[in-house]
Image (cartoon, helix red, strand yellow):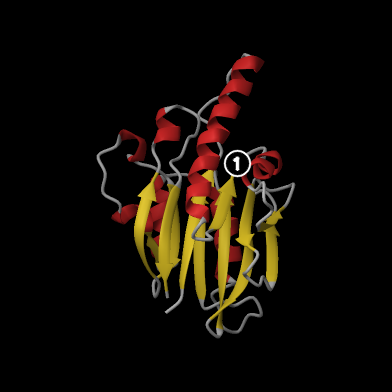
Amino acid sequence: MKKINIVSMDFTGPKKLCCARKRASQEQEMMKIASSYLHSERKHSPIILLQGDGLESRMRKIDRSSSFRVYMDSDTASAILIPREYNVVDWVSFPGIGSAVVVPEANHYLSLFSVSLTKKKELGRFQEFYQSFCVPENLSYTKYQIVGGSFPSKEDLVNFSDACSLTDISSYFHSSSAELQDDRYSILLSSDMSYSDTTRQTGLVKAKYLKHCPISTKIKF
């Protein structure tokens, strides 16, 4: 049985501060906390799915040892960091929506998507792209899929996962935290994959640094 660790984090903030000095201070503190979180997961060599603005400069702060291969497009506010021990066979960018990489796993292929969706029109476009990875006759077909990121609404997240027969990890995470109520951010898995040790980091949202709570999980298939 194959096991991988996944971390997904959206750097979108709830609002911009007017004062440049306060913005710089907030950015420094936020990156300190975010890097600490990602580095604590790194000892397990996770695949990291990132979304939000300013990713290029933020990734340099996160990956100081260059232990990841970085897949991103300047036209898309998303990125995927793959540990160097993984063999990536394909990378696709969906302008304005997200990106995907394909890695071989146990005689099959796994596609990983990092998306930042704010409008139903974007969701519809992404669903078309995603479906092309699910049809065995297509060259882009992969047996397993993982999607990490934000959706236009909680309802859209639920509807997408149901329509694509994906497991929505956030729906199984029980918490009374206000930061997780109606959250439209999650990691979605193919139905034949299982997961454990799922965590949601609420501190960055409580501090009003981020809009969505980061999520990490261990996946088996």
Total numbered labels? 1
Residue 216 shows in the view: yes
The N terminus is located in which quarter? Answer: bottom left
Query: Picture coordinates of residue 59 (x, y %)?
Result: 66, 45
Query: Picture coordinates of residue 150 (x, y %)?
Result: 50, 47
The C terminus is located in which quarter? Answer: bottom left
Q: Residue at x 69, y 58 (%)?
A: 93
Q: Residue at x 58, y 46 (%)?
A: 51
Q: Nearer the viewer, residue 40 or 17?
A: 40
Residue 167 picture quarter: bottom left
Q: Nearer the viewer, residue 168 or 110?
A: 110
Left-right relation of 202 to 75:
left
- The answer to whether 137 is drawn above or below residue 194 in the figure is below
Residue 97 shows in the view: no
Residue 127 picture quarter: bottom right
Q: Label 1 crowding class (10 Å Cα cut-off): few <14, some 14-19, many 20+?
A: some
Q: Nearer the viewer, residue 14 or 44?
A: 44
Q: Residue at x 37, y 57 (%)?
A: 169
Query: Picture coordinates of residue 201 (x, y %)?
Result: 40, 42
Q: Nearer the viewer, residue 86 or 95?
A: 86
Query: Picture coordinates of residue 189 (x, y %)?
Result: 44, 65
Residue 165 picture quarter: bottom left
| Residue wearing tag 1 | 52
Q: Secondary structure at mark 1?
A: loop
Question: As shown in the figure, which amino acid type bears the numbered disc 1?
Answer: Gly
